[in-house]
Image (cartoon, helix red, strand yellow):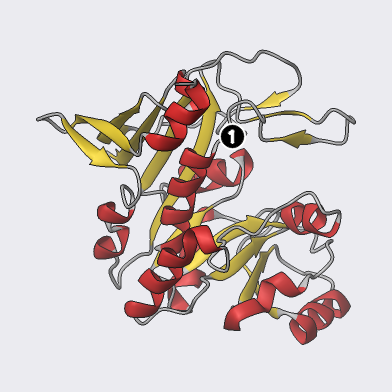
Amino acid sequence: MSAEKRETRNENVLQLYPLPSAERALRGLYLAHDVRQYANNASPYIYANFVTSLDGRIAVARPDGTGLMVPKNIANERDWRLYQELAAQADLIISTGRYLREWAEGRAQEILQTDDARFADLREWRITRGLKPQPDIAIISSSLDFPIPDVLTRDGRKAIFFTTANPNPERVREIEKQAGQVIVAGETSVEGKLFAQRALELGYRVIYSSAGPKILHLLLKDNVLNRLYLTFANRVLGGNPFATIVDGALLEPAVDFKMNALYLDAAGLEGVGQMFVSYERA
């Protein structure tokens, strides 16, 4: 049997932590974490997710030199399934102006694909819990310089734009007329604590960051990230330039996490394997 068929047919992963070890179905693995149970009225529960190579690459240079992209040789359907399960549990998904620019250029895909037949169960999961088919979306942007695609308001979704002090009033009016609300959450840059506070005031209690390393830094800096999910693909990539999971100034003090769960996906990546790990803020 080829490695490709082995990856397709083996739908289980091995739970290594917490003990005792046991086989778990890949489908529903992260839904079972039920992050919504941690929501409260004091602060939103915020979590993030990345897939990374063994040498720390979450993004490498595009072949045409126009920025960075998720490396094709670590992106895979099994990790993507779990990404979708995490997105499905959120009230609000964090993205950026860069995502909207890439969407306009045809280089980005829908964050939560509940209209895809492969993820129809996730749409049903949300509906049976009284949630909209799609979470609302938060766009973090200091410049507010991006096109506004219809993906922002599809399926009754709301878009909230978090920006810095004194935004261009004409641009604010334009955005609010087309897509959603603009909220100031920082002076010269969007601040994690203010973002979390403003989001909670709007009723968002479960927030998923699908954004990149700069957004992770602002969440870590203000100690508002509750859980971090990482997929470690068993491949070393090399290459410059590249991005790793966090980009910003030295975090002082360092932010500590404790392992929450660890799974071995031996069939992933054509049999090379990968690890699915979740960490809780200490």
| Residue 225, above or below 12 | below
Q: Nearer the viewer, residue 62 or 28?
A: 28
Which residue is at 62% across, 41% downward? 214
Where is residue 181, by image quadrant?
Answer: bottom right
- Seen in the picture, residue 80 relative to 151 is either above or below; the reply is above
* Residue at 48% in and 30% down: 5
Front position in the image: 130 or 250: 130
Residue 151 lies left or right of residue 87; in this view the side is right
Residue 193 can be seen in this image: no
Mark 1: which amino acid? Answer: Ala
| Residue drawn at the location 39% of the way across and 63% of the way down | 89
Q: Position of residue 62 (x, y in %)?
A: 81, 31
Q: Residue furthest front?
A: 1
**Residue positioned 30% across, 37% down in the render:** 12
Q: Is residue 104 left or right of residue 263?
A: right
Left/right placement of residue 73 relative to residue 251 reads right
In this rendering, is residue 194 above or below 255? Answer: below
Is residue 82 placed above or below 277 in the rendered structure? below
| Residue matched to label 1 | 75
Q: Using the rendered image of the protein, determine whether residue 230 is visible from the camera's viewpoint.
A: yes
Q: Is the N terminus in the top left, top right, bottom left or bottom right quadrant?
A: top left
Corner quadrant of residue 258:
top left
Instruction: Specify the farthest residue to the bottom.
Output: 177
Q: Secondary structure at mark 1?
A: loop
Q: Quadrant of the C terminus?
A: top left
Q: Position of residue 122 (x, y in %)?
A: 42, 65
Which image quadrant for residue 263? Answer: top left
Between residues 2 and 192, which one lies in front from this camera angle? 2
